[in-house]
């Protein structure tokens, strides 16, 4: 086991870090989504509602009219930042995780669409107002890796497997 240093602050990933990372994602109702604007290549960050697939992959519901959907259509590379600071203390001491991968649009005729829709509405009941609009679709992240900041001085690099993402299922829609 290696100890973090000034030159390399990343700790060895352990079960406590894995559990914290999974909880930050699973408990989240929203996250910050970072994409690249197709026309400029500049970063674009949006707040999006999120949920987690049975295989551990994060997914979102988004309108084709949104800037982030247009960006994902052009370049699927993206990051999702999970974890909000508490109401007290320094916000930088609260845990957060950036999940990095590619986000792909799922077709409405996907065999899991109805179950995904029902699950989404349990987590986000107000989405009932727009979930069936023709321009809305689910987008699923194919997780590649993640950076966990478990609080001050607790940095970890995680793999998709550390997050419990089933690699076989994350290749499917």
Image (spheres, grey):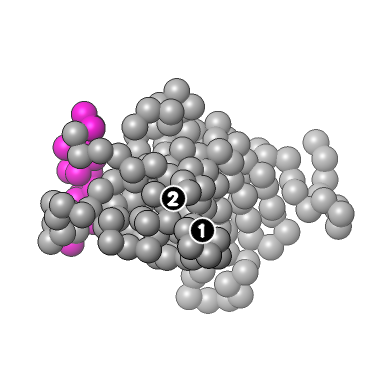
Is residue 123 inside the magenta stretch? yes
In the image, taking residue 100 as reference, residue 13 lies left or right, namely right
Label 2: which secondary element: helix
Query: Is 158 one of the magenta-colored residues?
Result: no
Foreground: disc 2 or disc 1: 2
User: Mark 2 = which residue?
Assistant: 74
Name the residue: 14% across, 55% down.
Answer: 133
Q: Check whether the beta carbons of the residues at disc 2 and disc 1 lie within 8 A of each other.
A: yes
* Mark closer to the chain start, 2 or 1: 1
- How many labels were placed on the picture? 2
- Residue 125 in view in this figure: no
The image position of residue 93, as x and y in percent, is: 62, 67
Magenta segment boundaries in residue numbering: 110-126
Q: Residues within 10 Å of mark 1 (few under 14, many from 20)?
A: many
Whole-number angstrom distance, CA of label 2 to CA of label 1? 9 Å
Residue at 33% from the left image edge and 43% from the top image edge: 105
Q: Position of residue 53 (x, y in %)?
A: 35, 38
Left/right placement of residue 6 relative to residue 87 reads right
Residue situated in front as seen by the camera: 160 or 153: 160
Q: Residue at x 12, y 61 (%)?
A: 129
Residue occupied by mark 1: 36
Residue 169, placed above or below residue 2: above
Taking the view exactly as shown, the residue that stands out farthest to the top is 168
Tag 1 secondary structure = strand
Q: Residue at x 62, y 50 (%)?
A: 147
């Amino acid at each position: 086991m290696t100890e973090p240093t000034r030159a390399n602050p990343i700790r060895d990933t352990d079960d406590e870090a894995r559990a914290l990372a999974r909880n930050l994602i699973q408990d989240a109702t929203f996250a910050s989504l970072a994409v690249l604007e197709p026309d400029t290549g500049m970063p674009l960050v949006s707040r999006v509602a999120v949920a987690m697939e049975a295989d551990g992959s994060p997914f979102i519901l988004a309108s084709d009219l949104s800037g982030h959907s247009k960006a994902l259509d052009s370049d699927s590379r993206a990051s999702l930042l999970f974890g909000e600071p508490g109401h007290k203390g320094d916000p930088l001491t609260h845990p957060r995780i950036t999940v990095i991968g590619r986000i792909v649009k799922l077709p409405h005729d996907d065999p899991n669409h109805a179950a995904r829709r029902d699950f989404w509405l349990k987590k986000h009941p107000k989405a009932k107002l727009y979930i069936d609009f023709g321009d809305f679709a689910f987008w699923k992240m194919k997780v590649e890796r993640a950076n966990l900041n478990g609080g001050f001085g607790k940095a970890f690099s995680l793999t998709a497997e550390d997050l419990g993402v089933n690699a076989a299922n994350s290749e499917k829609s």
